């Protein structure tokens, strides 16, 4: 057999059991030289687990892995790296205060005369960066870099260690559309230079755009292959979920009532102390969805944080239901004003990873009846609440006692959404509510948001997905450099018009 | 199966840490110091030593009561460190808090004659808790309002406490230096307080020669209380959440600053209570040599107990037993009893750096384990 036909990577009959779950069952996967393989599947289907096995982080319960046709045993990521396998995790593993070069040499420091040889490393990084068009400055400090650049640093890190097989687990979830385009160019370049890539995403459009081949996992098993030439978003969704998924949101016209959230002339600074909001004003009425669009980093994050009490407002006013809530505590805003907040960064704010699912589901309501009486926590009430929500929101977890952090990424998000959506609400604030969620669950969450609106809840939706904003919003506000540059009724909004606003171009014809 | 696993897993590291420490301690006893004897004889030496240690701790009523006596303050200082850990704080100051607790309780215990015994004792114990609580509150407040790291502040406060305590009982000098306010005027040149009044002493369960007082029951009750507080109340939920994820705690509406201060007050109060109990139950007076060493041992005890109150009970019992058996070990084998402290230090090293254990026993750190080891947290802001 010629080497051309031997897959660079093959898994045979991989099974992985966790306490109470079979994450992978008899998975067979092949990856050829110079191809991009997309791995699709519902939340909890076992994609990340499989990748972690290939990267040596987990040991398979059964099955074997072949690299270039030879069975290999990997006990830890160093073994995988030695075999030319690199992985970019969804949560970057970079030290924020160190430079790119320092981060990349961590763990494989190159030493000259007993000293770290940073210069040689930097030179190598620059060379790789040029060859693959990655645009990385070896001396930049990680925390100064935007998310897209950090991701490229992770990619360089794998290339620096001579990876031929790259695993990218949901690399696009946190990127802006522009950054995603950039990433795809890099991926194509890598592929053309003979690297092989496994790419996980929940965005079917992306799959059709870059993948050479598609493998679908469902409940831990490979359920099919698809060819991006012939597949459609609908056919892929059906293959993943096992039923037809309605990819468009059906909703009645809005029936807006009184103002629930009024924001006036809000000003605030970001973590670095630079102005992030410069006089933001808008309101959200009961029974309408206001979507906030904009390129990430234009103040959306800070806006949500100020409104939810997590960030100090330097000037301006926030009113909820006519009550002044400027710089009120998060508890006053969630409990007294009956609002909820699906935070953009679920790991930082939305959950406590080691806590069981049940405790995560009362993270911000533990102090209320029935979950506690006085200071006495009522475990039984917390557990029955959890049992119900897990069922209602289809959070796939072996039990409500499982640590929240061991759920799959999308199921963690569903857990947070379940907690926030299940209260009696006046105001629903959701930032990137469907980040990392599979198409079937997106459908469910979108329907929930619309149902809340129809029940008279005011909804403030922040999303970097223009599709999501367009699908759900009744009015669309566009943020640019800390200001709301325009507010457009959905009926009058076009992708082009919004795109111009997001780029800071104020078209006179677009009503503001 | 799953629940058994969940139950066993946290016990594994402490168990292996103790085992490793005993083995390394044994090797030290076999190959250092006395180098006479054949290899077999030398290898046999640690076995005999551990046998003596065990007999010293449990082999007689005297031994057992010494174990309990040594365990009591360790249990409370261990809880002190554990509670702070749960809030993400590293309380190195249990030693100073213990000393302040001793001074405060002795100040009440030697004064106020004529108070009914129960009242006097309760007030003296409360005073001890107050002294420790104040000493814990300072690093808490400084951390919250100035960002000063509690490790640095508590270490410094240990010195301040020791020097302050020394001053309060100072006998005065020949060049006209004033004696301290708590000094026993009848003690001549000795720097110590008068004896605590009978009404403020913790009664014996078993009197001399056993000298076991009711302090152990107080400490056990406090351990159960702390367990309840941490795991069954909203206060505990707040403490643990702040310790695990400060941002999520803010998001959840928890008053993070207050929780940090409260956790340090609680930690200080526990160490202060340890000082009070030791003073009112056992020493019946305070002198500088009743220092706060148990405060440092509390760190090891807390870590060995995996910062869980029930684990701390077990760990303090074990350390109490080691302390109790040390004298017999030395007497029987002529190995300096300091070897016990060496072993205890090894235990600390192994529980604080579980990676060593994973390497020795060729285990993989459990990837399914999401909870971070308690030691991971302490550096974080
Ligand atoms: N460390 C772990 N401990 C226990 N169970 C786990 C662990 N990691 C994953 N699981 C379980 O294995 C199953 C598969 O999870 P995995 O993370 O592989 O899903 P996924 O396909 O990546 O999903 P998502 O799209 O949501 O990221 C889930 O049921 C999850 O709860
Ligand atoms: Mg995943």
Image (cartoon, rainbow, N blue to C red):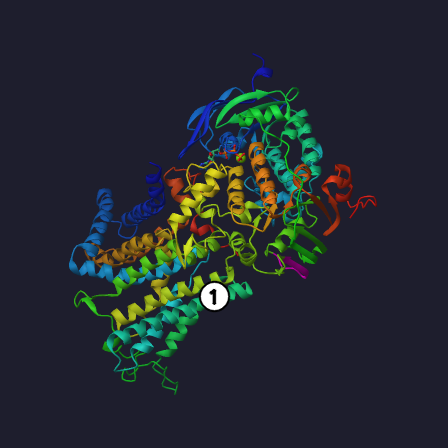
Percent x, y of residue A181: 70, 34
Determine the image quadrant of residue A127: top right
Percent x, y of residue A413: 54, 41
Q: Is A317 included in the stretch rendered in magenta?
A: yes
With A502 as the anchor, is A120 left or right in this view?
Answer: left
Q: Quadrant of the N terminus of chain A?
A: top right
Q: Which residues are magenta?
A: A311-319
With A493 as the anchor, is A369 left or right in this view?
Answer: left
- Farthest-out residue, right: A508
With A136 as the anchor, is B239 left or right in this view?
Answer: left
On screen, residue A83 above or below B138: above
Return the residue nearer the eye: A375 or A285: A285
Residue B114 appears in the picture as rendered: yes
Percent x, y of residue B36: 24, 49
- Farthest-out residue, bottom: B176
Percent x, y of residue A69: 52, 19
Answer few, some or many: residues within 10 Å of disc 1's Cα (few below 14, many 20 plus, some between 14 and 19).
many
Return the residue nearer the eye: A35 or A140: A35
At x 39%, y 69%, the residue is B132
Determine the image quadrant of residue A440: top right
Q: Is A180 included in the stretch rendered in magenta?
A: no
On screen, residue B58 above or below B148: above
At x 40%, y 34%, the residue is A20
Residue position marked by numbered label 1 in the rendering: B139
On screen, residue B25 above or below A91: below
Residue A356 appears in the picture as rendered: no
Report how many numbered discs are placed on residues in the image.
Answer: 1
Under tag 1, what secondary structure? helix
Give me the chain letter of mark 1.
B
At x 27%, y 77%, the residue is B196
Return the residue nearer the eye: A386 or B315: A386
């Amino acid at each position: 057999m010629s080497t051309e036909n031997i897959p660079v990577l093959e898994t045979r009959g991989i099974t992985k059991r966790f306490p109470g779950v079979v994450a992978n069952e008899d998975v067979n996967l092949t990856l050829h030289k110079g191809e991009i393989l997309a791995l699709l599947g519902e939340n909890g289907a076992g994609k990340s687990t499989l990748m972690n096995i290939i990267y040596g982080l987990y040991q398979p319960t059964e099955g074997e892995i072949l690299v270039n046709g030879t069975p290999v045993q990997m006990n830890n990521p160093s073994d995988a790296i030695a075999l030319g396998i690199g992985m970019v995790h969804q949560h970057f593993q970079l030290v924020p205060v160190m430079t790119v070069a320092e981060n990349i040499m961590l763990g494989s420091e190159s030493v000259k005369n007993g000293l770290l040889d940073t210069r040689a490393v930097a030179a190598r990084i620059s060379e790789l960066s040029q060859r693959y068009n990655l645009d990385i400055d070896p001396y930049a400090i990680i925390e100064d870099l935007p998310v897209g650049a950090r991701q490229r640093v992770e990619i360089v890190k794998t290339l620096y260690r001579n990876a031929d097989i790259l695993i990218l687990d949901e690399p696009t979830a946190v990127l802006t559309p522009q950054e995603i385009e950039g990433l795809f160019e890099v991926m194509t370049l890598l592929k053309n230079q003979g690297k092989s890539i496994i790419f996980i995403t929940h965005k079917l459009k992306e799959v059709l755009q870059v993948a050479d081949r598609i493998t679908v996992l469902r409940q831990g098993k490979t359920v099919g292959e698809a060819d991006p030439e012939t597949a459609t978003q609908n056919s892929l969704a059906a293959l993943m979920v096992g039923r037809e998924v309605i990819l468009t949101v059906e909703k009645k016209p809005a029936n807006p009532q009184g103002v629930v959230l009024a924001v006036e002339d809000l000003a605030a600074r970001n973590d670095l102390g630079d102005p992030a909001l410069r006089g933001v004003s808008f309101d959200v009425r009961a029974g309408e969805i206001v979507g906030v669009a904009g390129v990430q980093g234009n103040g959306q994050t800070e806006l949500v944080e100020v409104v939810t009490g997590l960030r100090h407002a330097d000037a301006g006013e926030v009113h909820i239901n006519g009550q002044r809530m400027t710089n009120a505590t998060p508890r006053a805003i969630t409990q007294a004003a009956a609002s909820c907040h699906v935070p953009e960064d679920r790991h930082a704010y939305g959950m406590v990873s080691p806590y069981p699912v049940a405790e995560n589901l009362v993270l911000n309501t533990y102090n209320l009846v029935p979950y506690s009486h006085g200071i006495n926590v009522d475990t039984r009430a917390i557990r029955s609440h959890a049992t119900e929500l897990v069922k209602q929101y289809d959070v796939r977890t072996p039990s409500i006692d499982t640590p929240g952090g061991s759920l799959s990424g999308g199921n963690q998000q569903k857990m947070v959404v379940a907690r926030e959506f299940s209260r009696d609400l006046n105001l629903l604030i959701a930032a990137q509510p469907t980040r990392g969620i599979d198409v079937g669950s997106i459908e469910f969450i979108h329907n929930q948001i619309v149902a809340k609106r129809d029940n008279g809840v005011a909804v403030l939706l922040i999303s970097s997905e223009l599709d999501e904003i367009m699908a759900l919003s009744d009015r669309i506000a566009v943020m640019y450099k800390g200001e709301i540059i325009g507010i457009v009724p959905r009926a009058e909004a076009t992708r082009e018009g919004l795109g111009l606003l997001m780029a800071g171009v104020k078209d006179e014809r677009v009503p503001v | 199966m799953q629940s058994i696993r969940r139950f066993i897993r946290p016990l594994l590291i402490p168990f292996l840490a103790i085992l490793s420490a005993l083995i390394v301690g044994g090797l030290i006893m076999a190959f250092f110091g006395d180098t006479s004897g054949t290899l077999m004889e030398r290898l046999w030496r640690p076995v005999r030593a551990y046998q003596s240690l065990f007999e010293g701790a449990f082999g007689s009523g005297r031994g057992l009561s010494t174990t309990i006596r040594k365990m009591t303050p360790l249990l409370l200082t261990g809880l002190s460190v554990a509670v702070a850990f749960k809030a993400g704080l590293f309380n190195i100051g249990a030693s100073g808090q213990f000393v302040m607790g001793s001074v405060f309780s002795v100040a009440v215990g030697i004064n106020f004659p004529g108070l009914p015994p129960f009242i006097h004792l309760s007030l003296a114990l409360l005073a001890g808790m107050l002294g420790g609580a104040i000493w814990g509150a300072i690093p808490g407040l400084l951390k919250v309002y100035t960002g000063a790291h509690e490790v640095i502040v508590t270490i410094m406060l240990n010195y301040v406490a020791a020097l302050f305590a020394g001053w309060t009982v100072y006998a005065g000098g020949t060049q006209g230096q004033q004696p301290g306010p708590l000094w026993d005027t009848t003690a001549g040149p000795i720097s110590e307080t008068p004896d605590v009044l009978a009404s403020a002493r913790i009664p014996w369960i078993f009197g001399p020669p056993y000298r076991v007082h009711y302090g152990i029951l107080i400490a056990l009750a406090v351990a159960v209380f702390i367990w309840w507080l941490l795991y069954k109340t909203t206060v505990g939920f707040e403490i643990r959440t702040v310790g695990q994820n400060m941002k999520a705690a803010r998001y959840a509406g928890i008053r993070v600053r207050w929780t940090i201060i409260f956790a340090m007050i609680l930690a200080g109060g526990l160490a202060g209570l340890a000082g009070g109990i030791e003073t009112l139950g056992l020493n019946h007076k305070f002198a500088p040599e009743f220092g706060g060493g148990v405060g440092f041992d509390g760190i090891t005890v807390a870590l060995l107990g995996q910062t869980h109150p029930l684990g701390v009970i077990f760990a303090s019992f074990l350390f109490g037993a080691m302390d109790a058996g040390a004298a017999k070990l030395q007497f029987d084998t002529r190995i300096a009893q300091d070897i016990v402290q060496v072993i205890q230090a090894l235990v600390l090293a192994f529980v604080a750096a579980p990676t060593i254990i994973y390497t020795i026993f060729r285990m993989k750190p459990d990837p399914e384990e999401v909870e971070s080891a308690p030691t991971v947290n302490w550096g974080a802001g």
